[in-house]
Image: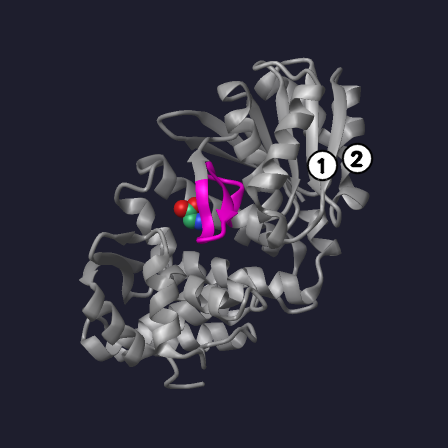
Amino acid sequence: MSTDVIKVNTPSRSYDVVVGQGVIDEVGDLTRKACGGSVACVISDSNVAPLYANAVAESLEAAGYRTTLQVFPAGEQHKRLSTLSDLLEGLAESELSRDDVVVAVGGGVTGDMGGLAGALYLRGCKVVQVPTSLLAMVDSSVGGKTAVDLEAGKNLAGAFFQPSLVVADVDCLDTLTPALFTDSCGEVIKHGVIRDAELFRRLVSKPINAPDFDPAELQSVIVRNIEIKRDVVDQDERERGLRQILNFGHTIGHAIEAASDFKLGHGSSVAAGMCCIARASARMGWCPDEVATDIVSAVEAYGLPTDTSEDHDTLFSYAVHDKKRHGTTVNVVVPLAIGSVEVRKLSLEEFRHLIDLGCGTQA
Ligand code: GLY
């Protein structure tokens, strides 16, 4: 299987996303070319570090870097300012300079926190993302969103800070549990719905979470997802307009995730959120009924949830505390057709009505 390189060109930085089998062993050489510097601080969590931190550190050392390793406890509950503070102190102890590199190895939480640590330390050093989960490969490692959670909600303190390089080794997906892999498929389906009807059809005709799914085909699906994200963030790095379409399914999805006390995974919550908003949009006459039924069928084909039984007032309350709210309005991404969505600015009353129309009608 060959290696693919997707070029990202945002106003603040241009960088490569390298996708392939075994590319984790090339992190050192690729980092040398993309970043230079002499020190590389590897940041990983307690689940991923035992699997991949050594391979990454050895590759960096072979490329001439002095390396250090910081491991934090795995889990969204550790994506907090206190963990970030420890990471920043660790970077200072490593005597990292602004020309040196933070290498975040892991899933979305590690990428978000490693990226934010790199954005803040010395007002910004170089960041290399080495995503090891499907969700991190197709979404969070690309586009420069970094954040930690606050008591008041997810991802409320962060920065847009683009990495200098992303290296996605598809072999890392072999160590994901089937449940985690399937969870990430919610974001993969989302990319088809928002921008690419052909990808959507591919995903439905052959679900990528089938046990015998062809690895070369999987890499090509991952690459297409990264291209879709790249095309959006190249045009709107800071989510002033177009980038909001990447939030399809997220306003209700985040509410479902929070209402479940984060027991339901992010991708599963987004999948349910997409179905709810699609049903509501069809009932409002904003899209044909088939758009909603196609989205629900796709989500079903992956064994992901298509609805929620959470109380509507609870969902509304979590959703309007989401940072996508703008004063007395909330921007909601609605499907027009498979492959096409639009952002609608709704009053809180209109949004509350959508929850009644789309949620709990199947659960
Ligand atoms: N995950 C959505 C975005 O990066 O904008």
Q: Say which label, 1 or 2, has the lower sequence index.
A: 1
Q: Secondary structure at mark 2?
A: helix
- Label 2 CB less than 8 angstroms from ligand 1: no
Q: Are marks 1 and 2 in contact (CB under 8 Å)?
A: yes
Q: Position of residue 321 (x, y in %)?
A: 35, 58
Q: Position of residue 106 (x, y in %)?
A: 66, 44
Q: Secondary structure at mark 1?
A: helix
Q: Which quadrant is the C terminus positioned in? A: bottom left
Left or right: 210, with 8 as reference point: right
The answer for how far apart the CA atoms under marks 1 and 2 are is 7 Å
Residue that mark 2 sits on: 55
Q: Position of residue 212 (x, y in %)?
A: 69, 67
Residue at 61% across, 53% down: 77
Foreground of the two, 270 or 191: 270
Name the amino acid type tagged 2: Ala
The residue furthest bottom is: 362
The image shows residue 16, relative to residue 226, as above or below, that is: above
How packed mark 1 is, by other alpha carbons closer than 10 Å (few <14, some 14-19, many 20 or more), is many
Left or right: 29, with 354 as reference point: right
**What residue range appears in magenta?**
139-157
Residue that mark 1 sits on: 24
Determine the image quadrant of residue 166.
top right
Is residue 125 visible in this depiction of the protein?
Answer: yes
